[in-house]
């Protein structure tokens, strides 16, 4: 009996592929984890991603419990010609953790984390979240530079870079990656480190992924915590020009210990914010000091002194608490479209457009975010890791966030229009805030700059038939082109 016809109703995109029921059952029997299929219990929950805009229907979802399950799933996919998507934390805004009519290798239950304090290394499974990692590393007084929302998966984040509250002091998440275990498209597990398959490690450091299933990641640890100084100040939007100028002057002189974000949005109507300010347009300044909390109190003081604020929740707090400050703003299932570009500076013309873009946002949940990129991020040579651009001093994130599906078009238009407008002040895209796959420029040659050719070589070596399809525009060379190059 053919599963395709039995469970899926119609033969859809991947159509030519027919899955034999006995083969699927034999595959299921080989797994320690669950195999989820359409019209069976748990399938609809399992296919759901963080972004409510994404609605994909994979043929199979293999919820793996360990490397053996991953190997079995890759071999099954290869034998049956099914394209693969890998799910780590499921938080990719573009929905790359799933695939219509293919197989999802779901690592959400592979989230173990082990700290080796003697070697100052942490090893985490490929489905671990930032919260999982922080919980274990902080027990030993260590941290790894990660993102600013604790539910994000560490694997997806790292494979495309990873920017957060420690970036200026300790670099990107991918800079802290020292080794990984990867199940490649031939169903073999390989280790990538400085001494074994170092080309693969280079590619995993920010190259956008899709070289295989990363079952474990190892990171260098940095001493930090348990407490840090964290600044969180909301100023009224009507003073945005003055605040953003003062912020620019501050970040240009700030020490590497300070990593910050400025965002233009509206005060949420949540109990943690004074009711009088609910829905008030604001400029948010948030920053962490990666060092002694009392030094941090002094270093972050200027951010709190740009005149009267709507709210100032800055304080010394546990690092794990600071890592969750923004969690509540990003619930599962809301509709999201996030895009980005790098900025050459934050001059008055840029500031004027930032303010105008925020004022035009159709949803009061949306924000326009400025991430200063300095210190350790910019000290790494551009070719030293696969992560592309490192020279721009600012990253702009345009976050359209909304609830009503009837507003989809308006919100997408706002994000895309402003991306185009702001690109005249810089260019490129940060792959963790990539827009949607069919957006102009997302698969462009320019994404990885000088690193692109090397990434194509890696893809050709480790995934010549493109079993892993869900990355951004890095395709294996056609066999003939490989021959041409080797001649
Ligand atoms: C609320 C929120 C906050 C965010 N904050 C930040 C931030 O502060 N800084 C930042 O840099 N980014 C941030 N991001 C962006 C985030 O880094 C990306 O969305 C990233 O892709 C999420 O990784 P994931 O593992 O959760 O995603 P998934 O959706 O599971 O996967 C993302 C991509 O990586 C691949 N992948 C995932 N796991 C593996 C694996 N183990 N092996 C091989 N491939 C894998 C997937 O196939 C997919 O292509 C945020 C995203 C959200 C939703």
Image: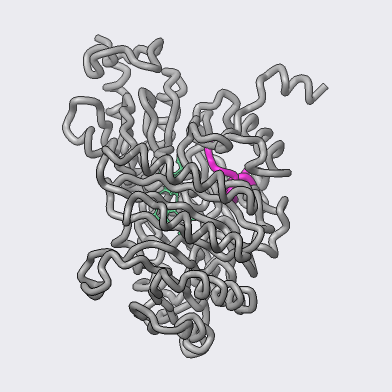
Query: Residue placed at 52% from the left, 60% from the top?
Result: 163
Q: Is residue 132 above or below residue 57?
A: below
Q: Residue 280 falls in which quadrant of the image?
A: bottom left
Residue 292 is at least partly visible in this image: no
Query: Residue 380: x and y, percent?
Result: 69, 60
Q: Residue 316 falls in which quadrant of the image?
A: bottom left
Q: Is residue 48 above or below residue 353?
A: above
Q: Is residue 57 above or below residue 318?
A: above
Judge left or right: residue 201 versus residue 64. Answer: right
Query: Residue placed at 60% from the left, 54% from the top?
Result: 342
Q: Observer-nearest residue: 296 or 179?
A: 296
- Extreme residue in the right direction: 487
Colour scheme used in the picture?
A: one colour
Could you tell me which quadrant the N terminus lies in?
Answer: top left
Judge left or right: residue 163 versus residue 333. Answer: right
Q: Observer-nearest residue: 391 or 49?
A: 391
Is residue 223 located in the magenta-colored stretch of the structure? no
Could you tell me which quadrant the C terminus lies in?
Answer: top right
Judge left or right: residue 244 versus residue 316. Answer: right
Is residue 209 located in the magenta-colored stretch of the structure? yes
Query: Residue 85: x and y, percent?
Result: 42, 33
Q: Which residues are magenta?
A: 200-211
Q: Residue 112 falls in which quadrant of the image?
A: bottom left
Q: Is residue 67 above or below residue 223?
A: above
Judge left or right: residue 142 versus residue 57. Answer: right
Query: Residue 118: x and y, percent?
Result: 52, 72
Query: Residue placed at 63% from the left, 49% from the top?
Result: 424
Query: Residue 182: x and y, percent?
Result: 52, 42
Query: Residue placed at 35% from the left, 12% from the top?
Result: 18
């Amino acid at each position: 009996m053919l599963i395709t016809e039995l469970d899926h109703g119609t033969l859809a995109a991947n159509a030519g592929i027919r899955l034999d029921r006995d083969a699927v059952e034999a595959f299921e029997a080989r797994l320690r984890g669950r195999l989820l299929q359409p019209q069976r219990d748990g399938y609809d929950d399992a296919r759901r991603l963080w972004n409510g805009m994404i609605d994909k229907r994979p043929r199979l979802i293999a919820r793996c419990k360990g490397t053996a399950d991953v190997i079995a799933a890759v071999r099954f996919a290869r034998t049956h010609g099914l394209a693969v998507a890998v799910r780590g934390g499921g938080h990719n805004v573009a929905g790359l953790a799933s695939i219509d009519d293919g197989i999802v290798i779901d690592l959400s239950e592979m989230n173990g984390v082990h700290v080796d304090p003697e070697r100052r290394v942490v090893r985490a499974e490929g489905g671990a979240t930032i919260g999982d990692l922080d919980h274990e590393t902080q027990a030993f007084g260590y941290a790894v530079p990660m993102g600013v929302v604790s539910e994000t998966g560490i694997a997806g984040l790292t494979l495309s870079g990873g920017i957060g509250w420690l970036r200026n002091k300790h670099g990107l998440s991918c800079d802290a990656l020292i080794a990984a275990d990867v199940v490649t498209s031939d169903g073999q597990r390989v280790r990538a480190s400085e001494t074994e398959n170092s080309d693969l490690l280079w590619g995993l450091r920010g190259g956008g992924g899709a070289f295989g299933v990363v079952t474990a990641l190892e990171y260098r640890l940095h001493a930090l915590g348990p407490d840090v100084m964290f600044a969180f100040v909301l100023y009224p939007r009507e003073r945005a020009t003055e605040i953003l100028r003062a912020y620019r002057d501050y970040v240009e002189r700030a020490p590497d210990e300070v990593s910050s974000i400025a965002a233009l949005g509206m005060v949420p109507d949540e109990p943690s914010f004074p009711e009088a300010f609910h829905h008030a347009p604001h400029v948010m300044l948030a920053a962490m000091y990666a060092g002694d909390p009392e030094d941090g109190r002094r270093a972050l003081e200027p951010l709190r002194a740009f005149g009267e604020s709507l709210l100032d929740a800055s304080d010394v707090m546990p690092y794990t608490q600071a890592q969750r400050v923004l969690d509540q703003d990003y619930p599962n299932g809301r509709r999201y479209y996030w895009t980005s570009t790098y900025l050459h500076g934050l001059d008055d013309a840029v500031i004027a457009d930032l303010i105008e873009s925020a004022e035009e946002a159709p949803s009061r949940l949306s924000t326009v975010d400025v991430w200063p990129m300095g210190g350790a991020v910019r000290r790494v040579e551009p070719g030293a890791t696969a992560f592309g651009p490192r020279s721009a001093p600012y990253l702009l994130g345009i976050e359209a966030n909304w609830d009503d599906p009837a507003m989809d078009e308006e919100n997408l238009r706002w994000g895309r229009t402003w991306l185009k407008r702001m690109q005249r002040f810089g260019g490129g895209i940060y792959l963790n805030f990539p827009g949607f796959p069919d957006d102009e420029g997302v698969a462009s040659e320019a994404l990885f700059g000088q690193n692109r050719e090397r990434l194509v070589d890696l893809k050709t070596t480790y995934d010549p038939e493109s079993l892993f399809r869900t990355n951004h525009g890095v395709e294996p060379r056609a066999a003939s082109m490989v021959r041409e190059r080797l001649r």
